[in-house]
Amino acid sequence: REQQASGGGGGGQQQQANNGGGAAATTDDVIGASALCEALDLRTILKPDTLAVLSPQLYATFWALTLYDVTVPHERYEEEMRRLRRTLEDIDRLQGAFAGPSGGASDPDAAAKVLERRKARERATTALRTLRAELQAHVERQRAVVQAFKATCAGWFHADSGSGLAMVHLLAHCILPRVTFSPADAIFCARFVELAHKHSAPNFSALQLFQAFFNSLSTHIFACTAKQASNLGRFIHES
């Protein structure tokens, strides 16, 4: 997950979970939340007061997803592809120089250098092709997850008369336990909240969530290590 936090081009190493079955994405074929609910038997893990305001499907979805699933670092992909293209241009320029009238005949190692550059070009070309494929797969995965999110978020938060109780339980059982794990998890939590707000999940309130978060922030900071506190700060910065 540290790689995902930095947004590097290694996103394609993340296991792809999209089965690509139907036209409409659901959490069953994209996220696997239902299977996780059954495997963990969440109704015996979560307390009744939590289940009264949060669905097991929400809990399973939150913990099943990763940063790779909810965001695509386009800038980092583009930066790496530009670097590879510059490498190819440099190799071609050197190859052109050695293909001149002298052909590097005065250099006994000229042939070896030409071969070395040819192999370097092949490696850079393969890396660029692979990175483009990874970007496409990453975009498709993120799109499928967002579609599943939109299709299922209507049943995640149960009505609680506007008391904000659902947001308190979301913090206690999802956001706060995960946000301090790593920078990637901190960014994931911010993106998850952003998606819930953007797609107007019923009974979700970003205002009540952050009110509850900041009301308890000082308590959590004093219980954190320096790295955990840094991750809390990253969550605030990304939100």
Image: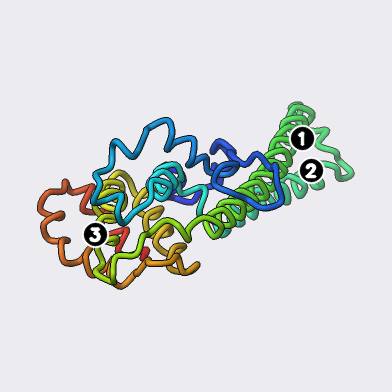
Write down the quadrant of residue 46 in the picture. top left
Q: Are marks 2 and 3 in contact (CB under 8 Å)?
A: no
Write down the quadrant of residue 235 in the picture. bottom left
Q: Would you place residue 145 above or below residue 41 in this image?
A: below
Write down the quadrant of residue 168 in the picture. bottom left
Answer with mark 3 or mark 1, whichever residue precedes in sequence: 1
| Residue 183: x %, y % from top left | 34, 49
Label of residue 118 in the image: 1
For the residues labelled 2 and 1, the Cα–Cα distance comes to 8 Å
The residue lying toward the viewer, choosing from 87 and 18, is 18
Q: Are marks 2 and 1 in contact (CB under 8 Å)?
A: yes
Q: Would you place residue 112 above or below residue 26 in this image?
A: above
Q: Which element is circle 1 on?
A: helix
Q: Residues within 10 Å of mark 1 (few under 14, many from 20)?
A: some
| Residue 172: x %, y % from top left | 24, 52
Q: Would you place residue 130 above or below residue 192 in this image?
A: above
For the residues labelled 2 and 3, the Cα–Cα distance comes to 63 Å
- Viewport quadrant of the C terminus: bottom left
Q: Residue at x 29, y 62 (%)?
A: 167
Label of residue 95 in the image: 2
The residue lying toward the viewer, choosing from 105 and 209, is 209
Q: Amino acid at mark 3?
A: Val
Q: Which element is circle 2 on?
A: helix
Answer with mark 2 or mark 3, whichever residue precedes in sequence: 2
Q: Residues within 10 Å of mark 2 (few under 14, many from 20)?
A: some
Of badges 2 and 3, the one in the foreground is: 3
Q: Which residue is mark 3?
A: 168
For the residues labelled 3 and 1, the Cα–Cα distance comes to 60 Å
